[in-house]
Image (spheres, helix red, strand yellow):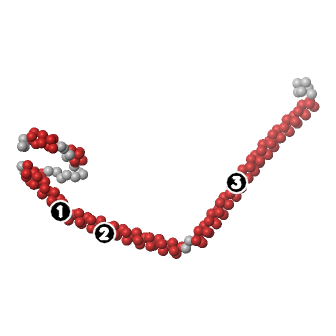
Amino acid sequence: MAKSGNRQACKILAKQLVQLRKQKNHTYAVSSKATAISIQTKLMNSQMKMAGAMSTSAKTMQAINKKMDPQKTMKTMQDFQKENMKMGMTEDMINDTMDDFLDESGDDEESEDIVNQVLDEIGIEISGKMVRAPAAGKSVPGAAAESKKATLSDEEIERQLRALGVD
């Protein structure tokens, strides 16, 4: 229209363009307000659900408090603690008694006497060599492997004795 020189038509088209831009901005504003209202509605709905849940919880706690006697519960807890301490003391006494019984049994001396007797019977002198021998137990690295090897058959023992020159 501007090229053809129709100024009146250009003014009308320019006004329509301005109105269209205003309408577009207005549409955006209304859309954002509608979104805000939707979000606010969802927030209110979740708050109502939360209030309902809190109400139910409060009713449940009231019912429990009516049925629960705090003094009775405290007495029960104290009785439990007292009986638990008694059980611990009894267990300690039993463990001490068993330790004393097992320590007094003299199994170590008896087993050492049997080993010495067996070694005397086969002619091996051990008394001087045992003083220098390391103590067997968990600290010896090969103790577990040697205990597995200790289950040799009679034939293997005889073969090893012959190899050592013992008849």
Q: Amino acid at mark 2?
A: Met
Give the CA separation, mark 2 to mark 1. 21 Å
Numbered disc 1: secondary structure: loop
Q: Nearer the viewer, mark 1 or mark 3?
A: 1
Left/right placement of residue 15 relative to residue 57 reads right
The residue located at (60%, 72%) in the rendering is 66
Q: Which residue is mark 2?
A: 93
Amino acid at circle 3? Leu
For disc 3, the marked residue is 43
Q: Earlier in the sequence, mark 2 or mark 3?
A: 3
The residue sitting at the top extreme is 4
State left or right for residue 103 relative to residue 122.
right
Q: Residues within 10 Å of mark 3 (few under 14, many from 20)?
A: few
Alpha carbon distance from label 2 to label 3: 64 Å
Q: Nearer the viewer, residue 15 or 70?
A: 70
Quadrant position of the N terminus in the picture: top right
Q: Left or right? Give the position of 131 relative to 78.
A: left
Q: CA distance from mark 1 to mark 3?
A: 80 Å
Question: In the rendered image of this protein, does residue 9 appear above or below residue 150?
Answer: above
Q: Earlier in the sequence, mark 2 or mark 1?
A: 2
Horizontal and vertical percent for residue 27? Answer: 80, 42
